[in-house]
Image (spheres, grey):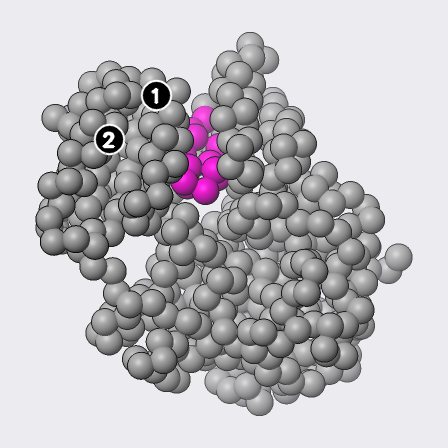
Amino acid sequence: MIKKTDPDIIKGYLEDSSNLTGGHADGVYLPESEAEIAEALTKCNSKKIPLTVSAGQTGTTGGCIPFGGWILTTHKLNKIINIDKEQKFAVVQPGVTLEELEKAVAKEGLLYPPDPTEKTATLGGNVSTNASGGRCYRFGSTRNWIKRLKIVFPSGEKLDVARNDKIQSSRYSLLVPRYSMPKTKNSAGYFSAPGMDLVDLFIGSEGTLGIVTEIEVALAPALQETFDIVAFFPTEEQAVDFVEESKKAEDKEVNFYEFFDENTLQMLKPSFPHIPAGAKAAVYIEQEIVEESNKAFIDYWAELIEKYGGSLDNCWLAADARQKEELAKFRHAIPEHINELFKQHHQTKLATDIAVPAGQFKEMFEFYRNALRVTRYASLFYIKFGHIGDNHLHVNLLAKNGKELTLSKELVLKFVRKAVELGGTVSAEHGIGKIKHDYLKEMYGDAGIKEMVRVKKEFDPAYILGLNNIYEKERLAA
């Protein structure tokens, strides 16, 4: 097996998109097979050496950043093993990227529907955090599309577990965490549900229970033609109400609704100068057209947009591949611009990943708006954007100094507590990692964290895997 101990090589594995610093490791394993993963695991397990899994390094919570021990990267486990066009599934190794899988299945007239924004993310990383994206509104998160996983545990034991293998029928029947999960998309802590499948325990476990070596995913028929539109509105309230009314109609195959607030539009305007003057919010919609003509769809959207103060004349419509690519660039430009602001001004970014149940979204949205207007927080630069179809917005706060950082942390905690009060999740798609422990405690309390630790100890009794992911490593000694 390939092993690297050169500090310059190790340094390349000490970052992701979280801005977490201070990581360090003694070396990096680069396995090329399941057997080599098992070899690395059993060696570290026997000597109680911490081992952190690294994949595409696109995470936002520091999950792949080690603080001691060794790193195991899945980069070389990047084979698409099989695509079954008739049965609509694919089998891949964990280092395969979303981009690679999507291109491969598209050639077969198929689609892998989960749509995380970062296409260089790996399938293993997506399983680790139960990742999702805009199309989660229609198709659900990664969890919904996992048919089977192969996993190696620190002991070297291997498990091949398929969808519909019930945890109650396995040797792990007592390991269902004893807490209730929110009725939303969720990527916070170990999965728990009555009658759950065993495979679900490992999806979203953030590299703390075992290492996934093979993934079987379900596929769908490729989308037919889509109708893509960005609609601009004179107020945020009108944009939200527009989405709320549209979602009530059940005869439309909408893949996603994405929201952009005024500050987001202003941040993007230098790169997209044709954003209409006076626009205070925008909603980006992708709808699959399942009929021959899209005229009826255009009429529907035009009427609804105008009802909430917009105008079809100011909308951006995409009728061909080039135009759709331009709209996609607009949608995906937000993280790039935020990171650029961070680098230019040496700012510290804090971001929420909150989703709430459908009936609670407007209350959560108004809580955001009212809190951000409070004089105490008036100096903070923020943007609100994201997957409004799933009642899931990201509020990003960029602190320019220590005082603003303190205020930002204070404000995010207020958001988290409100979300929990409304039955929501503190992490809808990015996981907890090493930077959101306090938020998870707000959601589940100490008793819930103890349940997760109980599960951890069954699979990793030497406590080597993913230390400080999800919960503090100190909790393992309790």
Compared with 215, 251 (above or below) is above
433 vs 306, left or right, is right
Which of the pair 148/384 is nearer the observer?
Answer: 148
154 drawn magenta:
no
Tell me the kind of residue under disc 1: Gln
Compared with 159, 450 (above or below) is above
Does residue 454 appear in this view? yes
389 drawn magenta:
yes
The numbered disc on residue 238 is: 1
**Residue 260 image-quadrant placement:** top left
Tell me the kind of residue under disc 2: Ala
Residue depicted at 19% across the width and 46% down the height: 227
The location of residue 329, given as percent across then percent down, is 24, 45
Magenta extent: 382-395
37 vs 220, left or right, is right
Quadrant (top left, top right, bottom left, bottom right) of the C terminus:
bottom right
Most common SS among magenta residues? strand
Q: Which residue is mark 2?
A: 231
The numbered disc on residue 79 is: none
The location of residue 206, given as percent across then percent down, is 61, 61
